């Protein structure tokens, strides 16, 4: 993420994995509305996952216990990271005061 602290996903002590769409929206120009929608769509295709449209939806870690569900999640996460890495360093991050 090229010098900016943050992560697309966070594991919470509550047993949830949080998808940080808010961080993506505010800090990553690579993750415009289309990419965030595409990631949400990929994740919602996983059995047991139905993400709300808010900026910090959560997934129960137990939903990833199934090998196929975990495989699909890792595929979506790898796609997400690939989208972020595909953007040149200077245009990958957005300053906090920039508008989307």
Image (spheres, grey):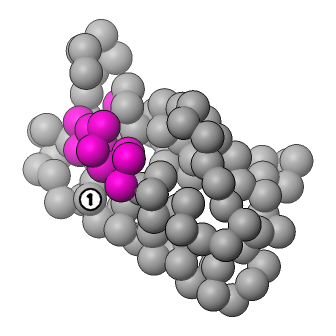
Tell me which corner region of the image, top left, top right, bottom left or bottom right, holds residue 63.
bottom right
Decide: is 96 above or below 12: above
Query: Which residues fall within the magenta stretch?
Result: 27-38
Which of 93/46 is in front?
A: 46
Residue at 38 percent across and 47 percent down: it is: 37
Give left or right: position of 74 versus 27. right
| Residue 5, placed above or below residue 16 | above
In this view, the residue in front, 7 or 5, is 7
Left or right of 47, for residue 80: left
Q: Is residue 19 magenta?
A: no
Instruction: Please tell me in which quadrant of the rendered image residue 50 appears.
Output: bottom right
Q: Is residue 18 visible?
A: no
Residue 79 pos. (x, y %): 35, 68
Question: In x, y percent, where is residue 1?
Answer: 34, 49
Q: Which residue is mark 1?
A: 83
Which corner quadrant of the image does residue 47 belong to?
Answer: bottom right
Residue at image point 30% right, 37% down: 33
* Identity of the residue drawn at 11% across and 50% down: 88
Give residue 72's position: percent from left, percent from top. 53, 78
**One can see residue 5 in this view:** yes
> For residue 32: magenta?
yes
Going by the picture, which residue comes out furthest to the right? 14
Observer-nearest residue: 83 or 33? 33
């Amino acid at each position: 993420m090229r010098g900016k602290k943050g992560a697309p996903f966070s594991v919470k002590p509550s047993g949830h994995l949080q998808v940080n769409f808010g961080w993506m929206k505010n800090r990553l120009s690579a993750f415009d509305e289309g990419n965030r929608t595409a990631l949400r769509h990929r994740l919602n295709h996983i059995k047991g996952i139905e993400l709300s449209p808010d900026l910090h939806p959560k997934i129960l870690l137990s939903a990833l216990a199934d090998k196929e569900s975990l495989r699909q999640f890792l595929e979506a996460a790898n796609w997400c990271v690939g989208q972020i890495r595909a953007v040149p360093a200077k245009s990958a991050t957005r300053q906090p005061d920039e508008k989307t």
